[in-house]
């Protein structure tokens, strides 16, 4: 799935690079014209002074400077080659047509990546739901309705909104969004990521340990302690439908994992950074070749 996300970013980067190349070429050409005119004028003044033509200096300076050179322009793809001259003509319509063609090409590639990403996500969601029996899904539906009825400020998520490839997460209480933060049952967290969870009812504390990491939360408190160091969270752990739920993003990141939020679908993807394999990118002129993601852009 990550390769589609990188492919999407790389495709947009390719569009930006080609557009920048075109703009830079035109700017360089304009600067060349300006510099050539300045040199012509400087040479004329120098020759007049050396020849003692002081009386003709004013009339000479007042005359427009003629271009003694011709411009030969050659266009190949989106490149402009200047051979000689102090003026340049740019075929704007040709450049616009090329830019339009490139934009259409990138749009096709981006749409294809989006479709592939959506297809991959749907497959993962189907795999997640397949882990639940029909009775378990029905129970989750009843719990969701109960939570919605008793908590007007909470959005209930489907169990397949939490996507963790290679990790088995099962919920008996659905994840929720409260004040913009996702909360998940601490039991599901411990089972999925191999963390040990201890509940201290007298102090209303939850202690999560994994390896050398210890996380201590207190219900309804914004303070959280990681290996004894105090930190603050926007939304504290709390009890929903008789289950203790904790802020997923903070806890998961403390366990060394990465959380991606897809706002359009409300999907949350949990990744292990150790599995991240960014393909090499090579650039030559306006061409971009990406090995691994099968994207090639160029003339």
Image (tube, rainbow, N blue to C red):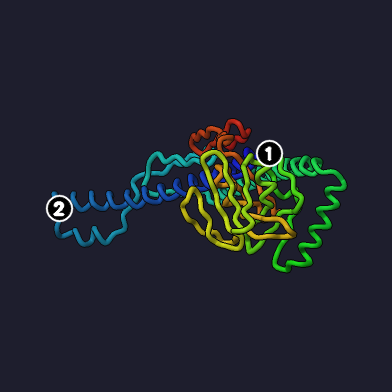
Q: Earlier in the sequence, mark 1 or mark 2?
A: 2
Give residue 185's position: percent from left, percent from top. Answer: 69, 52
Q: Position of residue 209 (x, y in %)?
A: 57, 44
x and y percent of residue 298 in the render?
57, 36
Instruction: Decide which of 97, 290 is in the foreground and name it.
Output: 290
Q: Outermost residue toward the top?
A: 291
Front of the two marks 1 and 2: 1
Return the residue at label 1: 167
Q: Nearer the viewer, residue 282 or 30?
A: 282
- SS assignment at label 1: loop
Q: Is residue 268 left or right of residue 231?
A: right
Within 10 Å of the Cα at label 1, are there few (<14), some (14-19), or many (20+) other Cα atoms?
A: few
Which disc, if any, is residue 49?
2
Check the picture and name the quadrant holding the N terminus: top right
Give 207 or 54, whichever is nearer the viewer.
207
Residue 247's tag is none
Image location (x, y in percent) of residue 46: 18, 50
Residue ranking furthest to the front:
202
In the rendered image, the vertical position of residue 211 relative to residue 47, given as above or below: above
Residue 224 visible, this angle: yes
Which residue appears at 51% of the width and 33% of the height? Answer: 282
Residue 119 vs residue 291, the one in the foreground = 119
Whether residue 18 is visible here, answered yes or no, is: no
Residue drawn at (80%, 44%), measured in percent from left and top? 129
Number of numbered discs: 2
CA–CA distance in space, label 1 to label 2:
85 Å
Residues at marks 1 and 2 touching, judged by CB atoms closer than 8 Å: no
* Residue beneath the point at 73% across and 68% down: 152
Q: What's the residue at 57%, 36% (across, down)?
A: 276
Which quadrant of the view contains residue 116? top right
């Amino acid at each position: 799935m990550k390769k589609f996300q990188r492919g999407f970013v790389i495709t947009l980067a390719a569009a930006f690079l080609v557009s920048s190349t075109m703009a830079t070429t035109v700017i360089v050409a304009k600067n060349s014209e300006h510099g050539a005119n300045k040199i012509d004028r400087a040479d004329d003044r120098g020759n007049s002074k050396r020849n003692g033509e002081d009386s003709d200096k004013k009339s000479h300076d007042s005359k427009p400077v003629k271009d003694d050179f011709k411009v030969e322009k050659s266009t190949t793809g989106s490149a402009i080659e200047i051979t000689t001259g102090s003026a340049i003509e740019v075929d704007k319509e040709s450049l616009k047509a090329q830019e339009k063609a490139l934009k259409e090409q990138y749009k096709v590639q981006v749409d294809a990546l989006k479709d592939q990403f959506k297809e991959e996500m749907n497959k993962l969601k189907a795999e997640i739901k397949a882990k639940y029996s029909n009775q378990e899904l029905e129970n989750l539906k009843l719990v969701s309705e109960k939570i919605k009825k008793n908590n007007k400020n909470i959005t209930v998520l489907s169990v397949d909104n939490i996507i963790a490839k290679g990790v088995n997460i099962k919920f008996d209480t659905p994840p929720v969004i409260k004040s913009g933060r996702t909360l998940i049952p601490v039991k599901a967290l411990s089972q999925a990521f191999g963390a040990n969870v201890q509940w201290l009812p007298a102090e209303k504390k939850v202690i999560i340990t994994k390896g050398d990491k210890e996380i201590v939360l207190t219900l309804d408190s914004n303070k959280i302690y990681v290996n004894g160091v105090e930190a603050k969270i926007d939304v504290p752990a709390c009890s929903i439908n008789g289950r203790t739920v904790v802020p997923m993003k903070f806890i998961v990141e403390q366990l060394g994992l990465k959380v991606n939020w897809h706002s359009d679908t409300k999907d949350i993807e949990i990744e292990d950074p150790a599995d991240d394999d960014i393909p090499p990118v090579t650039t030559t002129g306006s061409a971009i070749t990406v090995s691994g993601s099968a994207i090639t852009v160029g003339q």
